[in-house]
Image (spheres, coloured by chain):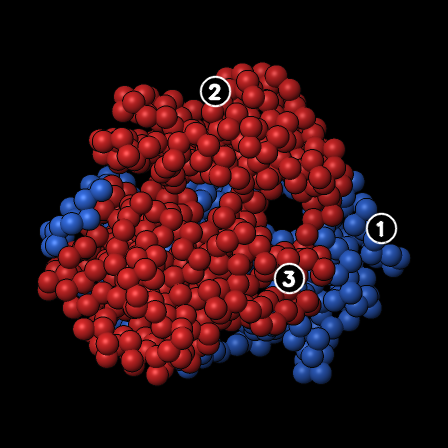
Chain colours: A red, B blue
Amino acid sequence: MNDALVADLGAALSPDRVFSSPLELGLYGRDASVIEGRAGVVIFPVSTPEVQAAVRVARRHGRAVVPRGSGTGLAGGAVPLAAAAGDPVVIVTTKMDRVLSVDEEDRVAWVQPGVLNLDLSRAVAHLGLHFAPDPSSQQSCSVGGNVANNSGGPHCLLYGVTSAHVLAIEAVLPDGEVVLLGGLEPDVPGYDLRGAFVGSEGTMGIATRIAVRLTPTPPAVRTLLCDFTEVAPAAATVSGIIAAGIVPAALEMMDADITRAVEDFVHAGFPRDAAAVLLVEVDGLPDGVEESAARIREVATANGARGVRVARDEAERALLWKGRKSAFGAIARIAPNYYLHDTVVPRTKLVDVLVEVYEIARRHDLLVMNVFHAGDGNLHPLIVFDRRVPGTMERVLEAGAEIVRTCVAAGGMLSGEHGIGLEKRDYMPLVFTALDLDAQARVRDVFDPDHVCNPHKVLPAGSRCGDLQSVPEGAWI
Amino acid sequence: MDLTSTRPPAPAGLAREVRPAVAAFAAEVGRQGPVAVVGARTQWHVGGPLDPAAREVRAPAGIVEYEPAEMVVRCGAGTSVAELAAALAGAGQMVPLDPDDLRATVGGLLAVGHSGIRRLRFGPIRDTLLEATFVDAGGAVVTAGGPVVKNVTGYDLCRLLVGSLGTLGLLAEVVLRAQPRPPVSRWLRHDGADPFDTRRRLFRPSAVLWDGSTTWVLLEGNGGDVASEQRSLGAGWSEVEHGPSRPAGGRRSLRPSALRALPGELGAGEFLAEIGVGTVHVTREVPPGSPDPSTRHLHEALRDVFDPERRLNPGRRVHA
């Protein structure tokens, strides 16, 4: 039943960028989450008109579309959900990978959505500029994906998440119209549609060109590794640094197991016997950086740090960061599977919540490691396991649910940077009232009244009060 | 994970406790008839004249919760900037809203959406709002966002509320991101310095302002850094107690590089431009601009789904 659709998409794009073999459909039926879906057709447009044409073809055939960047999302946001009316058309943006223009004076670059995060920073490095959001997946995640998820990263503590770095978006709406949201001027007439679109997880349309803000690379940087023999003093140091009026560029925590795994993987000199380490970076002008670094050392020492090491040069700094960012590669040596959670709690609740997280893992006989953005309270409990062992996946999911509930009970929210997607969709009522969800559904419906763009994501079905038509007849998800 | 149910009932949702002051405000807004929210009337002209038939309501005022180690503050939307600043000063923190008139309310500033004079360094006002509790056109209390500094849980309604002039909902209570107050703050001025070159010489200045002939710079941070930044500017700069006063007629919004063309269009003293930002403060009133034609239907549809009867701040327009 795909033949006519494939032919029409081939005519709209080019037959060699339209895929429908079982192998390709299987590959694009999932992302980096544990959720599996089913793609109907997978296409690789290269331009805005091609995306527009594809959206219109899909619509004519009664198919939903699912935008996809590099597929590194962890919340199932890019998983196409099988539907009775026909499985979705997955629109992959990886061939839209050009930096279109760079304006040094305005510090703005127009990019296509498939440009990789790190490639963008590399492309403007010679101007002394960079793209500030730096997810751990920055070597493989795309700017379009960053926009969809309002992605973060270690350095978002000081610089803010993706929304603060996106000025304008050209997007194809679910009805095939091309719109320009936001602009290069500081204030654009009307409502901040750009702000609503960023973080909408592909449910409001497909970004085809993005104007990003470029950030000057700081003249001075200090990176400190604080070593603790207990977790609580490390967490107290986090609060102490913030309370001292310092907002570091990054403030990351790694617990004992992950520190050991990382050290065995990258040999950066992380203490293998530490209960927790903090990786703290301050940047800016030299005097302030030195003052902050000295103050951080004092706070850490006063809280009982066993040692504070300052990276001597750029090579050592790069190695420490390589360790932090390859944490998820490192754990592959421990167990074949991992489930990475993403929740956010008030920073002062970090210790209490961490204690609970370890206890939850113990109760479910699971190994949990913690490597996370401590400075903004953004936890990433990482459950490592072997899903081939019968019953394990069930325990992993159960423990995950308990972790989410614990974070919410501590005054936190469901996601700090990975998004809601499918993974957390049904937890939304834990943090929002029916009226709150209805308000969000109203905004979504302004952009996608027929729920054809990445349907069934973010909001639980029935979020629009008195509107149970949101799940199409015969859909199964 | 259960993703298999085909037609779940509408989610029950969290039962959140509504603070009495917020509930009273919601009751005051009610479900019928035109209402206009009043702050301190410091920016009353923005968005055009209100329907005179609108009943005036006021949002709750006062700090609700402030934990310096979280660097966030929860307050009523009717709280004045002066009160907010005083509450945070003791812990060495601030929210860089920076209105000219400190009687302005937090909710009024957010609803108007004009960023402060330090936007170059601290970002636009929309990035300070973490959570917003508002009363919708049906008189219901709705919360958007969350009380933590990093959050991507659900759609970002906070961004839509900032600059909405109360046409989507009336702000009742907000959670704002606070910042450490810079230890040293220094205004410098120079008659004749090229403002664009000035900005390029500096890393993260708080403001670079230009009226067509004089350039002002606000440097903030560590004392040594402020001094070295000052040195990098070269000779001819003098320290002044305050920055320039802003023409209060209206604001224009241009690409930062387009500011170069201003002197051909406006005389000295007729404008004050924020270099690197693109905001231009002018003596004359500026009518609201038109949105990109491709988006007009989206703006109108948003208003339709939130306030179909146009009872919230009737008469106010966010665009032409």
Q: Which residue does the numbered mark 2 point to in the structure image? A: A232
The image shows residue A413 at horizontal and vertical percentages of 35, 41
Question: Mark 2 or mark 3: which is in front?
Answer: 3
Which of the labelled discs sits on residue A123, or is there none?
Answer: 3
Task: Confirm whether residue B34 shows in the render.
Answer: no
Q: Are marks 1 and 2 on the same chain?
A: no
Which of the labelled discs sits on residue A144, or is there none?
Answer: none
- The amino acid pointed to by label 1 is Arg
The image shows residue A246 at horizontal and vertical percentages of 61, 36
Which of the labelled discs sits on residue B231, or is there none?
Answer: 1
**Does dot 1 land on a helix, a strand or a loop?**
helix
Q: Nearer the viewer, residue A150 or A268?
A: A268
The image shows residue B56 at horizontal and vertical percentages of 31, 61
Quadrant that contains the N terminus of chain A: bottom left
Give neighbour class at mark 3: few <14, some 14-19, many 20+ (Cα, 10 Å): some
Query: Would residue A231 be found to the left or right of residue B213 on screen?
Result: left
**Residue B114 in the image: above or below residue A157:** below
**Residue A342 in the image: above or below residue A351:** below
Q: Dot 1 falls on which chain? A: B
Q: Are marks 1 and 3 in contact (CB under 8 Å)?
A: no
